[in-house]
Amino acid sequence: MTMNSRSFLQALLAHEAEHAALFQEAKLKRSNNRQAMGNTPLLASVYGEILPIADSYVTKPIEALPFSLFDLYRTQGTRVEFEHAYFDRRRRLASLAVAALQDDEDTYIAALENTIWAICDEFTWCLPAHLYNHDASLEGEEDKHIDLFAAETAHALSETCHLLGDRLQPQVVKRARREAMRRVVTPYMSVKRAYWWETCDINWSAVCAGSVGMAAIYLLPDSKVLMPILTRVMDAMECFLEGFTDEGACLEGLNYWYYGFGYYVYFSELLKQRTGGKVDLLTSDKVRRIALFPQRCFLQGNQVANFSDCSRTGGVEPGIFSRLGEQFADIRVPSLEPLAAPIDHCGRYAKTLRSVAWLNEPLLREREGLALGTDFLPEAQWVIARWQSGEQTVSFAAKGGHNDEPHNHNDIGNFIWLADGVRWLDDLGSGRYTKAYFGPERYSILCNSSAGHNVPIINGELQQAGRAFAGQVLDVALSDTEDRYKLDIGKAYTVHGLESLEREFAIDKVEGKLTLTDTFTFSTPGAAITERFVTLVQPVIATEGEIRLESEGKSRVLRYDAAKLKASISTAEHANHHNGVEHVYLIDLTAAETGTQSSFTMTLENGSTVR
């Protein structure tokens, strides 16, 4: 929406006296939540996850953040050790705040006060992995550096004090507000410094700016002081929206849609309240298309088309889906079983509290269930299909794009095949975040390299990273019975003599069958070609021309021309984002010989039921 500075200030001034009523939907939970929990099983389920966590923190000591953990990122490039303790404090803060809001007694107040005090003691609210990466001049001002989590912390403390300040010790409230101002809001207000994330088009711009903006709204009731800060925040939010394709796709993946767009919505709703509804950032058609993105990339149940740094599964976050559903009539909700954990491993306060405050169970129940059909996102070059074949539900996702996308993986031409809840051919998704993961070694890591995706290897060479390494859509034909999607992915490689690599997916929706045809054109014959397939389901070479995959009493068969291709299976380990290690199977179909033009066809078909 367009509004000049005078109108914006007038909107803020007109509602300045209502500052204490901000986010009233969370404050009201103190008086009506017990009745609400009895009437809404989803709300009871959310509380059922949060309250036991809060109960555990009442007596559990606050974990220290020693320098030895802080320094591990510098010395050995690992993040998890420090972040485990750091995020444990944020989980403590979020769960105790929610518990205190639903409890008229003071059961949780002392533990909440101690948590706030400990966070105020921290050397910096910024993670070691983010410190100095974008602004080396900050040495000596580490406590004033603003990254994702410093900004989130300022918002969390200011919102806690706003909602529970009358029940907390005044000294705790004063200190928390002072630290949020000193560390985050005041540095952001400085005209001397523009943060790199203010003009970026990824999740950082929304999370950082949105958190700062919300903290400022709580901490600065004076509209004339507040207005220029919010104007700057809204400029950053406009940059954030530019990172989505015209069709609303988040190339960072669903996890970062939740994260970045979540903070866009959190800020928008608080700003809307602060201006009495006169400023609403959720009204544009592009925002509506972005809001529809999840219902396109959920495949079935909680299974996701997890391109880029994204998890393979992702439950519904009830707070944001409720609020967006109230805003947009065409929002659909994937399965509500299971819901996303209301408090995640990072202890994200805004998400946790809004999972309670915004939850609208009747709306979620009414909108539950995704329609079958195929979505083609032309700018993202994604095709995502869901259909019924006999008694089985089948899903497919494939992508083109380019190899310089946010949280990029070298994965042009990659695809996912899912039937009856089993991911037969897969995308590994995000790996364990380390210094190497975001450094020059990124594409030596399996899940980021094209070696860890369902794409060819040519002359031993993998796809390359960079904007120039891109796919080209050649043909799309979608119908109720068959989908065809054809790409040229040859430009993803720097293989000498490779002129084109046309990859065609043909989906037979009646039979539930995928046919993949790759056609290679070279200037000279003799190239070494390997068709790579990635799965977490153990494959077996049943016979020449047939590889069988079996899982959960079901099976699929990968068929290929044994006269042209020789099969082998190897294994690898995937260090996933949640610090687990998964056993990965790599199926390689290697060409016996190649000419200047070579074509290979493979099919993935139903197998007989395993007994």
Image: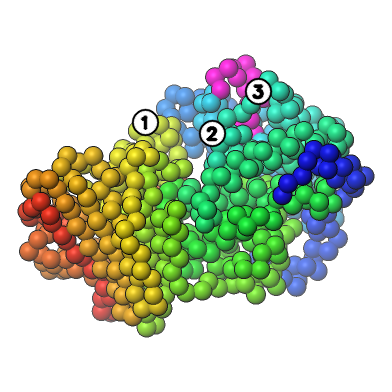
Q: What number of labels is visible? A: 3
Q: Amino acid at mark 1?
A: Pro
Q: Are marks 1 and 2 in contact (CB under 8 Å)?
A: no
| Residue 218 seen by the camera | no
Q: Determine if the magenta segment contains residue 145.
A: yes
User: Label 2 belongs to which residue?
Assistant: 82
Q: Determine if the magenta segment contains residue 279.
A: no
Is 269 rendered above or below residue 480? Answer: above
Residue visible at 11% across and 58% down? 566
Mark pair 1, 2: CA separation: 23 Å
Q: Which numbered disc flags the more N-terminal residue, 1 or 3?
A: 3
379 or 339: nearer the viewer: 379
Quadrant position of residue 468: top left
Q: Which numbered disc flags the more N-terminal residue, 3 or 2?
A: 2
User: Label 3 belongs to which residue?
Assistant: 193
Q: Residue 502: x percent and y percent?
A: 24, 56
Q: Residue 311: x percent and y percent?
A: 46, 53
User: Label 1 belongs to which residue?
Assistant: 440
Q: Are marks 1 and 3 in contact (CB under 8 Å)?
A: no
Q: Which numbered disc flags the more N-terminal residue, 1 or 2?
A: 2
Residue visible at 28% across and 53% down? 488
Q: Amino acid at mark 3?
A: Arg
Q: Residue 267: x percent and y percent?
A: 71, 46
Question: Could you tell me which secondary element the residue under label 2 belongs to?
Answer: helix
Q: Which mark is residue 320?
A: none
Question: Could you tell me which secondary element the residue under label 3 belongs to?
Answer: loop
Residue visible at 33% across and 50% down? 471
Residue range (magenta): 135-150
